[in-house]
Amino acid sequence: MSLPWAHIDQALSEVQPISLSGRVVRVSGLVVEGTLPRARLGMLCRLMVRGDDEGVPAEVVALREDTCSLMPLRSVSGITAGTPIEPLETSPAVPVSYQLIGRVVDAWGNPIDGGKRIRALRRYPLQPGPLNPMERTMVERPLPMGITAIDTLLTCGEGQRIVIMAGAGVGKSTLLGMLAKNSDADVTIIALIGERSREVKRFVVKELGPRGLEKAVVVSATSDTAVALRIRAA
């Protein structure tokens, strides 16, 4: 028995998929409340503000019986009661690729250094499940940091966490740039969260420099961006 493939193809081409959408009910400060069928915590949505074709991205941060709370990732200007809400992705994820190395990107993984577009190989979840503690690698081998004083007196190990604490203006950024340039790490990931815009450029150009940037991925969300966007970048 042969199937009528031509008729099936024509029928499929005429199918109009059902899209789940909602509307804004209330705007309270920086939080937007609305209705959105099948909303999930962490879901990324788009608020279709009039006059803005791209819409305002927002993240679902709370759920109630018939409404949900969203945190806009841009200015709430233009959002009103009745603004349409369109879901974008069910779970937060970021694009990853070897092309990220040597680049400065925002919280979405988009380049902000004026370079060419980054082609993603896959998307990695922002909130992966916890690792099995018995599968974690033990800290057994030293990691040369390229700074004699640290390697001699404060030896660091592969997989170890360290904290640099100091007052303002005493050289934390300078030290961080030295570690990124001189350490034996194959790739360094530097997150500049809540910094002022001019400090981000100064760090990349002055402290990190071309030698440090060639093996680094710099993620930036400055102090003038939305709180939810800074959380996503972190």
Image (spheres, helix red, strand yellow):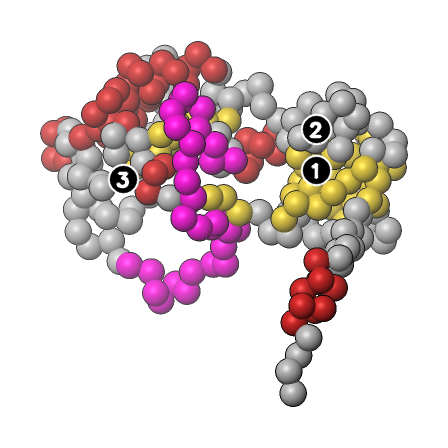
Nearer to the camera, 58 or 193: 58
Circle nearer the viewer, 1 or 2:
2
Nearer to the camera, 145 or 103: 103
Residue at the spot of label 1: 46
Q: Position of residue 79 (x, y in %)?
A: 79, 27
**Quarter occupied by residue 192:** top left
Query: Quadrant of the image for the N terminus?
Result: bottom right
Q: Considering the numbered disc 3 on the image, is that residue within a helix, a strand or a loop?
A: loop
Residue at the spot of label 3: 187
Mark 3 to mark 1 CA distance (whole Å): 33 Å
Mark 3 to mark 2 CA distance (whole Å): 37 Å
In the rendered view, would you say 135 is above or below 126? below
**Quarter occupied by residue 82:** top right
Which mark, by number, is residue 53? 2
Nearer to the camera, 159 or 75: 75
Whether residue 180 can be seen here: no
Q: Earlier in the sequence, mark 1 or mark 2?
A: 1
Q: Position of residue 22 (x, y in %)?
A: 82, 44
Which mark, by number, is residue 176? none
Q: Position of residue 132 (x, y in %)?
A: 41, 65
Q: For residue 73: magenta?
A: no
Q: Which residue appears at 50% of the width and 26% of the height?
A: 221
The stretch of residues the image draws in magenta is 108-137
Q: Amino acid at mark 1?
A: Arg
Crowding at mark 3 (Cα within 10 Å: few <14, some 14-19, many 20+): some
On the picture, is 68 further left or further right than 200? right
Q: Amino acid at mark 2?
A: Asp
On the picture, is 45 further left or further right than 216? right
Q: Considering the numbered disc 1 on the image, is that residue within a helix, a strand or a loop?
A: strand
